[in-house]
Amino acid sequence: MTQFSNHCSDYIYKNLHTYYTQAIRKEETSPSPYDSCNGQSLSNRILSITCDSIVLYLDEAIEQTPLLLTKDSFYIQDISHIIESEYNTLVYQICGSILKTHETTSQVMKRYFHYLEVDYSFIQRIGKCIGITQRCPYVVGETLFAPEKGSVKTNSSWIAFHHIIYVEPINSQLISFKVRKYHELILPLTHKRTSDMIYKTTTLYHTTKAISIDLQEKFTSRYQDHTFEDMHIIKKELAFKTLGQPTLKLTNLFDYLSLHRANDMLQAVLGEDNPYLNDIRATFPLTHLYKDEYT
């Protein structure tokens, strides 16, 4: 494996330190001050997203600017393409309420990323290490948001998969998402696109969880009656093999993050079509952590 400078490793470690020590928060038992329902749930709803239904949702939605998402937000909808509306975003809450704002979904999500203290670009760099180059989900602990389309240069709707308990196609162009609290969200998505969103979110979730476990193993064993060195082979198998997924180490991720970060910097300086990039990539190939398991 290619060796990298201490400065680069320190930079990545600081990012990981922020990711795992500041951003992963336990859910509070008391209602958030931003919850518009004050903890009370409205009746169950079937939310079918059409042009006609958006008009109805806009009428009942509560305006908030600036709008901060909460743990109860399960769908952030981009409506900036609707010329008739002065609003750009609708946010659907588990309690049954709907929020609206003049802000774009990009502004709303960026504020939430800042609130969690984990930048989206950092998550995207981890995504690149496992082959996610487009429509990267935002995964921080148990917070799992996936964009419906590329969100770097355009606005996108986002689905909170930590609130989705079941998915089923209605037809080739409609998908039904069963949401907590007996809500149903019907979206104009293909089965292929939905499966891709679930796959990417699942893979990124597994990766960050595995790295989190590796960080913990460096200081304490998950089996409290034994240190790692004293584990017998059966406990080691249980510790590292979960549902057939590969073992991941923090040191491996350092190398992959450094390589992909360096590629991004060279691409920004030299340009995407610079012929020298091919020579550099031939010497330092952009491989993925899951090249054996998922290709």
Image (cartoon, rainbow, N blue to C red):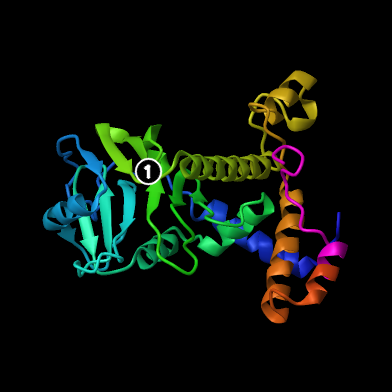
Q: Nearer the viewer, residue 58 or 70?
A: 58
Across and down, in percent, residue 146 comes to 46, 50
Bounds of the magenta span? 280-295
Q: Is residue 266 above or below residue 226?
A: below
* Residue 114 in view in this figure: yes
Is 158 in front, or is 239? 158
Residue furthest out toward the left: 59
Q: Quadrant of residue 264?
A: bottom right
Q: Which amino acid, mark 1? A: Glu
Confirm whether the magenta stretch covers residue 282: yes
* Picture quadrant where residue 89 is located: bottom left
Q: Who's the residue at 50% across and 50% down the image?
A: 140
For disc 1, the marked residue is 27
Name the element at disc 1.
loop
Rendered position, 241 above or below 33: above
Tell me if residue 148 comes above or below residue 272 in the rendering.
above
Q: Can you say which quadrant of the picture contains the C terminus?
A: top right
Q: Is residue 70 visible?
A: no
97 vs 128, left or right, is left
Dividing the picture into quadrants, the one containing residue 107 is bottom left
Q: Is residue 287 magenta?
A: yes
